[in-house]
Amino acid sequence: MAKEIGAIIKLQVKGGAANPAPPIGPALGAKGVNIMEFCKQFNARTQEKAGKILPVIITVYVDKSFEFIIKQPPVAVQILEATKLKSGSPEPNRKKVASISWEQVREIADVKMSDLNCFTPESAMKMVAGTARSMGVTLTGQAPFNN
């Protein structure tokens, strides 16, 4: 028989750097979860992605046990890494801060495809392109799906 779910917690944590300090400690402690056990498991599973921001969904059961799912880094973070920027444009409609190629958009879409709400690589690329535009990043070249 399946366990009864007590709570679902969504956090964004740097890979390999989970510790009991805020925001992790208070979020898990309020639900009665063993914070150190979560930190150990999370750090062990994210060693290869050290330093990257990773969304994690923690399912806490009524008996205080837990499971967690680690997602891919957010698209905005991947775009910032690709363009080597600190942040997006404060006025994306007026001030453009960088540009990326459609090949870079395809790479980001391929990585993030499992977390996105789409079925084809082209639709994933359109979602990534929309995020880039909203950050003030222009796209160079011809879109591969318009040919």
Image (cartoon, rainbow, N blue to C red):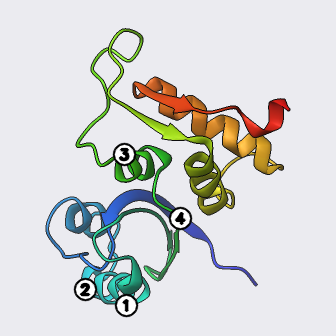
Residue in the picture at 29% in, 82% down: 39
- Distance from disc 2 to disc 3, alpha carbons, whole Å, reads 35 Å
Looking at the rendered image, the disc whose residue lies closer to the viewer, 2 or 1, is 1
Q: Which residue carries the number 1 mark?
A: 44
Q: Which residue is found at the position 33% from the left and 73% from the top?
A: 15
Q: Residue at x 57, y 54 (%)?
A: 108
The residue tagged 2 is: 36
Query: For the residues carrying marks 3 and 1, which lies nearer the camera in this image?
Result: 3
Tell me which label, 4 or 3, sits earlier in the chain: 4
The quadrant where residue 42 appears: bottom left
Residue assigned mark 4? 71
Tag 3 or tag 2, which sits nearer the N-term?
2
- Residue 97 or residue 37, whichever sits in front: 97
* Image location of residue 134, percent across then percent down: 46, 24
Callout 1 crowding tier (Cα within 10 Å): few <14, some 14–19, many ≥20: some
Q: Whole-Å distance between the Cαs marked 3 and 1?
A: 29 Å
Residue 83's tag is: 3
Which amino acid lies under the numbered mark 1 shown in the image of this protein?
A: Ala
Counting residues from the start of the chain, the first of labels 2 and 4 encountered is 2
Q: CA distance from mark 2 to mark 4?
A: 21 Å
Mark 3 lies on a secondary structure that is helix
For marks 2 and 1, the one nearer the N-term is 2
Judging depth in this view, the residue of 50 and 69 nearest the camera is 50
> For the residues marked 4 and 1, what is the alpha-carbon distance in whole angstroms?
15 Å
Residue 72's x, y, as percent?
A: 52, 63
Mark 4 or 3: in front is 3
In the drawing, does residue 122 fall left or right of residue 28? Answer: right
> Which type of secondary structure does the marked residue at label 4 adopt?
loop
**Quadrant of the frame with the C terminus:** top right
Q: Which quarter of the figure is the N terminus placed in?
A: bottom right
User: Real-space Cα distance between discs 4 and 3?
Assistant: 22 Å
Nearer the viewer's eye, disc 2 or disc 4? 4
